[in-house]
């Protein structure tokens, strides 16, 4: 059975937070929310907004469609973004 978009987004945000070792407080700060508000979104009591999705995608350096594409796609995009960032500094200082 396929997950709905809301549940998929909750799992994706949790996966990205885990991959980066971040707490809900960090995500809350990025979004201008309280930790309680993020917790309510992550538990399904409240819904993520389109603004939240846009800000989170920018924060993680991934495309909005990757964020909405599920945990695997988002984490793969995060890794690719980090690889590009790490590679951009190689060889610059000689």
Image: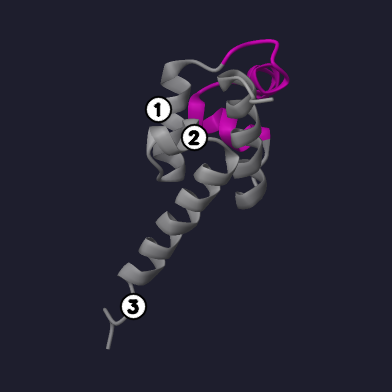
Q: In the displayed structure, would residue 5 be above or below residue 65?
A: above
Name the residue at 40% across, 68% down. 86
Q: Earlier in the sequence, mark 3 or mark 1?
A: 1
Magenta span: 24-47
- Work out how far the residue at label 3 is from the one at label 1, CA to CA, in angstroms: 30 Å
Q: Nearer the viewer, mark 2 or mark 3?
A: 2
- Residue with the mark numbered 1: 54
The colouring scheme, among rainbow, by chain, secondary structure or one colour, is one colour
Q: Residues within 10 Å of mark 2 (few under 14, many from 20)?
A: some
Q: Main secondary structure of the magenta part?
A: helix
- Quadrant for the C terminus, please: bottom left
- Residue with the mark numbered 3: 90
Q: Residues within 10 Å of mark 3 (few under 14, many from 20)?
A: few
Count all numbered tags in the image, as a single digit.
3
Q: Earlier in the sequence, mark 2 or mark 3?
A: 2
Q: Residues within 10 Å of mark 1 (few under 14, many from 20)?
A: some
- Residue with the mark numbered 2: 69
Classify residue 25 as left or right of residue 67: right
């Amino acid at each position: 059975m396929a997950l709905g978009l809301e549940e998929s987004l909750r799992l994706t945000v949790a996966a990205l937070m885990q991959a980066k070792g971040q707490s809900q407080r960090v995500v809350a700060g990025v979004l201008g929310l309280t930790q309680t508000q993020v917790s309510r979104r992550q538990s399904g009591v409240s819904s993520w907004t389109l603004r939240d999705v846009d800000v989170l995608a920018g924060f993680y350096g991934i495309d909005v469609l990757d964020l909405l594409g599920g945990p695997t796609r988002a984490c793969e995009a995060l890794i690719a973004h980090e690889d590009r960032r790490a590679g951009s500094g190689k060889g610059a200082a000689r």
